[in-house]
Amino acid sequence: MGIVVVVLGIVFLAFGALPPFASFYGTGLIRQRLAAPAATLSVAAVPTWRLLGADADLIHVKTGPTTFNGWLVEDLLIDGGPVRVGHPCQLSAGVVMRNTVLEPAIRAGVEAYTATLAETVGVPGAAVADLEIALGPTTVVSGRLEAFGGLVAVPFRLAGTPDALSPREIGLRKAVVTLNGTEQSIGDVPLMTLPITPGVGVTLTRMAMSPTELRVWAMLNVADPGRFLAPAPVGSGGSLPATP
C-alpha cells in the first residue's frame, strides 16, 4: 500500500508540473515565432494530463512590443479556449498600437478618399495640399483640394469617430465634411483595411483611439493554433506562419 501511495504521489507531482512546463515551452516558441523577447504563454487544462496531448481549456498570450505581420505593436493579448493543436479554435484578442505607426496607412486612405471628395465638389483630378491629421477620439483631417496648378483651391475638413466599420475595415463613423465653410454629414468613411492573415480569420469587434494610441479588440478564428508554435523560418523577423 505504501508503494502505491508513493507511485500516486509521483504521478500527482508529475502532472502538477505539466502546466508550468507547457507554459515555459510554449513561451519559448512564441518568443521565437513573433520575435518578441518579452512574450509569455500560459496554459491550463482539467484534468492536467490533457496537456500531454496538446489540449488546453484556456490559453493566455501577452507579447509586449513586437512586429506583427509588418505592423509594430506595443502589445498583443490573446485569450480563450478550448485549444487543441490540429483543430480550429476561437480566441479573443486585443492589440495596442501607436498612432505614429498607423498614420501613414490612414494618410493613404484619406488621400484616396479625397479623390472621391474632389469629384463631388466638381474639382476632378485635384491633389491634396497641406494635409494634416489629428488622431484621437474624434479624428480630424484638414487640407486643401487643389487643381490646375493651384488656380482652384478648396479648403476641406473631415471629422469623425474612429471605429470598426466592418470585420476588417477601420474608418470614421458619422463623418462630417466641411467644404468652404459648409458642413455636410456623409456617414461612414473607410480609411484602411486590415491585411489578410493566412489561417486566421479576424473579426473586429470594437476599438478606441486616444491622441497617442489605438486599442482594438477582435475575435480570431484560428485554423490550427499549433502553427503559432511551429519554429519560425530563419530570417522571418517574427510573423504568423505562412499558408503551406
Image (cartoon, rainbow, N blue to C red):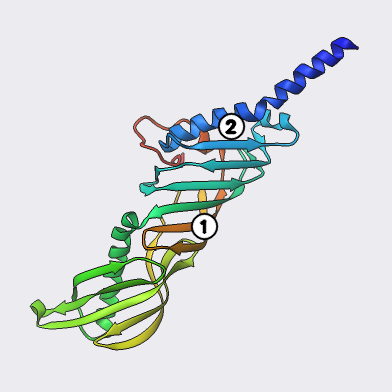
Left or right of 220? Residue 165 is: left
User: Which residue shows up at 46% across the image and 63% down it?
Assistant: 208
Identify the residue at horizontal 61%, vertical 26% (top origin).
Answer: 21
Q: Position of residue 15 (x, y in %)?
A: 72, 25
Pick whichever, 52 or 20, lies toward us: 20
Q: Give whichever of 85, 95 is nearer the camera.
A: 95
The N terminus sits in image quarter: top right
- When asked about the image quadrant of residue 124, the answer is bottom left
Up-down relation of residue 109 to residue 60 (above or below): below
Q: CA distance from mark 2 to mark 1?
A: 24 Å
Taking 244 as reference, is 157 above or below it? below
Q: Is residue 10 left or right of residue 136?
A: right
Label 2: which residue? Answer: 23
Let me know if residue 173 appears in the view: yes
Disc 1: CA contacts within 10 A as few (<14), some (14-19) or many (>=20): many
Q: Secondary structure at mark 2?
A: helix
Q: How many marks?
A: 2
Q: Tell me the kind of residue under disc 2.
A: Ser
**Residue at 79% over, 18% down:** 9
Q: Is residue 7 above or below residue 191?
A: above
Query: Could you say where residue 59 lies in the image, as x and y percent from the top left?
Result: 61, 41
Q: What's under tag 1, amino acid-wise?
A: Trp
Q: Which of the labelled discs sits on residue 38, or is there none?
A: none
Residue 226 percent location from the top left of the image: 56, 36
Q: Residue at x 51, y 42 (%)?
A: 62
Residue 203, image x and y in percent? 52, 58
Residue 125 visible in image: no
Q: Earlier in the sequence, mark 2 or mark 1?
A: 2
Disc 1 is placed on an element classified as: strand
The numbered disc on residue 217 is 1
